[in-house]
Amino acid sequence: MLKHHSSLFLITGLCCLIAACSQQPDDFREFLEDRELTYPGAITQTFTQPGNLRLGIGWSPSPDPSVTKYKVYWNNYRDSVEVPASTHSPSDTISTIITGLQEYTYSFFVYSFDEKGNRSIPVEIQNARVYGNTYQNSLMNRPINLTEPYKLLNDDGNEIMLNFLPADSTNTITYIRYTSITDEQKEVALPPDQQAITLNDYKYGTKVAYHSYYTPGRLALDTFPVTLVDTFPPIAFGIVKCDKSLFREISLPYDVGPLEGQTSVARLWDGSTSPQGYPNIFHSNGDNPLPHHFTFDMGKAYDSLRTMEVIGRDCCHNPVEYEVWGIADVSNAATTVPGNDPGWKDDAIAKGWILLKEVNRTDDGKGPYTLDFSTETPQVRYIRIRVKRVASNESAYSNLTELTIGYKK
């Protein structure tokens, strides 16, 4: 009896197994609502294009011809955008720009869909960064070369070279804004691979501004300007040497004469750079006791004299107490008393001479020695040196090697 039941069970199991093996896949459609389980082809080769509160997303399309659209999801699938499948060639590109984003690093999921609504497995695009105010506020204008921010290239000051440091790798352009000699507001561009730019029509004394732009990536949709515009340091020549080729000797009443022709006042602008010996010096004669004076013409008027470098003789009779006077026009400037007269100073002032500097040196007067004039120095063309005492305490002779005068241009 037990053996009979075991055989029955075995036959029943075999029948069930045969029935199961003979069941068709369509028999499972009732569980899929009469649909086949289909996965359209997924995308490949994704890329992103960062932008200002927006992002470009692109990919190589699926070669599956059944794909009709793509859907991009982000923000935990709460937001999405549809993109038509305009091509199925893997060599093409499909892209879209998503706007209204926050400055944040996102993850996106891209699905391919066919016309029946079947979707592919997702392709995740990670670390997609969106830029905005925080990034922009971190940007700074391209740094200038503070060692030599600019160089004036001609005497008129209308040709200048502006010098920058190497650009950051994300810098795309720097715009230079300036006023031209015709009072026109101009703008020129400095590319990141250049460290200097020359302005040929700059209006001397006006401001020069610069403004840089940056991109957060090679494929970025947007460039970002620096929030603030910066300005170059004030562009000025600084102290410029007066042109000695214009200097000329003149002789006014009571001016001291030279010891001989080769030691004239003209020796004071022959280009010497160190104390010289006789006869490469100015050497006065002994006819005018100290204090005595000599005068010369700078050849043009300067309205901003600032410095005078004095180089004495290599041995003796170097002025250590003296006055520097100046005047714009000597037409009526002749003083009526000699330099050692007690009334000389009042007479000089009455004739229009301006006392530019009183000098009292405590050394031997050889120099080089630089004295500074007041920033309020008026226009001056003619210089008079009134020597009051020399290092040797000699009573009538004075010697000098060179005078170099500077002005602020």
Image: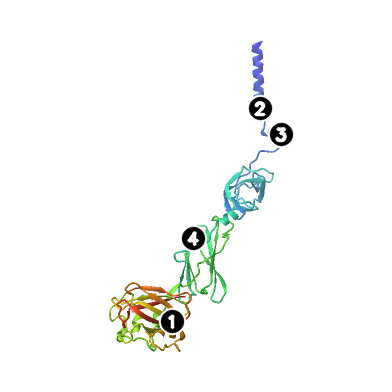
C-alpha span from label 4 to label 2: 74 Å
Q: CA distance from mark 1 to mark 2?
A: 122 Å
Label 4, residues with CA under 10 Å away: few <14, some 14-19, many ≥20: many
Q: How far is mark 1 from mark 3, CA to CA?
A: 113 Å
Report which residue position mark 1 lands on. Answer: 326
Q: Which residue is mark 2?
A: 20
- Give the amino acid type for the residue marked by disc 1 in the picture: Gly
Q: Position of residue 174 (x, y in %)?
A: 53, 64
Q: Residue at x 66, y 33 (%)?
A: 25
Q: Nearer the viewer, mark 4 or mark 2?
A: 4
Left or right, 315 with respect to 385, comes to left
Where in the figure is residue 345, as x and y percent of width and height?
Answer: 42, 83
Res. 269 in view: no
Residue drawn at the location 49% of the way across and 60% of the way down: 167
Find out whether the residues at labels 1 and 3 contact each other: C-beta distance under 8 Å. Answer: no
Q: Which residue is mark 4?
A: 167
Mark 2 belongs to which amino acid?
Ala
Residue pointed to by mark 3? 30
Which secondary structure, mark 3? helix
Q: Dot 3, how many residues are within 10 Å of its Cα: few (below 14), some (14-19), or many (20+)?
A: few
Q: Quadrant of the N terminus?
A: top right
Q: Is residue 227 left or right of residue 297?
A: right
- Which residue in the rendered view is the most extreme toward the top? 1
Q: Nearer the viewer, residue 11 or 186?
A: 186
- Quick one: label 2 or label 3, which is nearer the N terminus? 2
Q: Secondary structure at mark 1?
A: strand
Proximity of marks 1 and 2: CB atoms separated by less than 8 Å:
no
- Sequence order check, earlier mark of 1 and 2: 2
Sequence-wise first label, 1 or 4: 4
Can residue 256 be seen from the camera position used here? yes
Residue at mark 2 to residue at mark 3: CA–CA distance: 17 Å
